[in-house]
Image (tube, grey):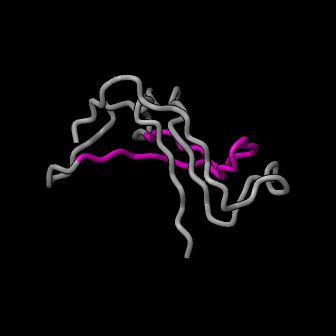
């Protein structure tokens, strides 16, 4: 079994949506949507997920991508090998302020 590759831009996360479990662990909900076209071979786009009816869900930004093994969006099937790594050139410019 091959791993699923996931990339998340931590700078774009809405930290007010993080929630805490009874044990004190910090959590974040994400949702993956199939990608129609991709420059780097990703198969899905990631967005932050909010509870039903939450106004923040309307403007939820793209926060990352995932690539399923041996799967590619149709636009990349003939040109990009499935084992090619996804370029990641965005580095956080500010100090990491995630509380965990």
Q: Position of residue 92 (x, y in %)?
A: 42, 29
Query: Where is 39 relative to 54, above or below?
Result: below
Q: Position of residue 23 (x, y in %)?
A: 14, 55
Q: Is residue 58 left or right of residue 43?
A: left
Left or right for 62, reference 52 = right
> Depth check: 73 or 19 in front?
73
Q: Position of residue 35 (x, y in %)?
A: 69, 46
Q: Is residue 4 above or below residue 61?
A: below
Q: Quadrant of residue 40?
A: top right
Task: Say if the magenta span includes residue 31.
Answer: yes
Q: Quadrant of the C terminus?
A: top left
Total number of numbered discs in the rendering? 0
Q: Is residue 28 magenta?
A: yes
Which sits in the foreground, 24 or 90? 90
* Near-viewer residue (45 or 55): 45
Bounds of the magenta segment: 26-49
Picture quadrant where residue 69 is located: bottom right
Residue appearing at x 70%, y 61% in the figure: 82
Residue with the most extreme right position = 78
Left/right placement of residue 10 relative to residue 37 reads left
Instruction: State the quadrant of the N terminus.
Output: bottom right
Q: Is residue 94 left or right of residue 72?
A: left
* Rendered view: 60 above or below 38: above
Query: What residue is drawn where x is 69% and y is 50%?
Result: 41
Q: Residue furthest top?
A: 94
- Residue drawn where x is 40% and y is 40% of the image: 51
Between 95 and 70, the residue placed more toward the observer is 95
Q: Is residue 26 above or below residue 3?
A: above
Q: Residue furthest bottom?
A: 1
């Amino acid at each position: 079994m091959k791993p699923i590759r996931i990339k998340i831009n931590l700078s774009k996360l809405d930290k007010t949506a993080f929630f805490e479990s009874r044990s004190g662990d910090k959590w974040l909900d994400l949702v993956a949507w199939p990608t129609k076209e991709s420059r780097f071979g990703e198969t899905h786009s990631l967005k932050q997920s909010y509870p039903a009816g939450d106004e923040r869900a309307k403007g939820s930004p793209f926060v990352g991508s995932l690539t399923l093994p041996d799967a590619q969006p149709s636009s990349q099937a003939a040109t990009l090998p499935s084992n090619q790594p996804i370029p990641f050139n965005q580095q956080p410019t500010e100090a990491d302020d995630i509380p965990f």
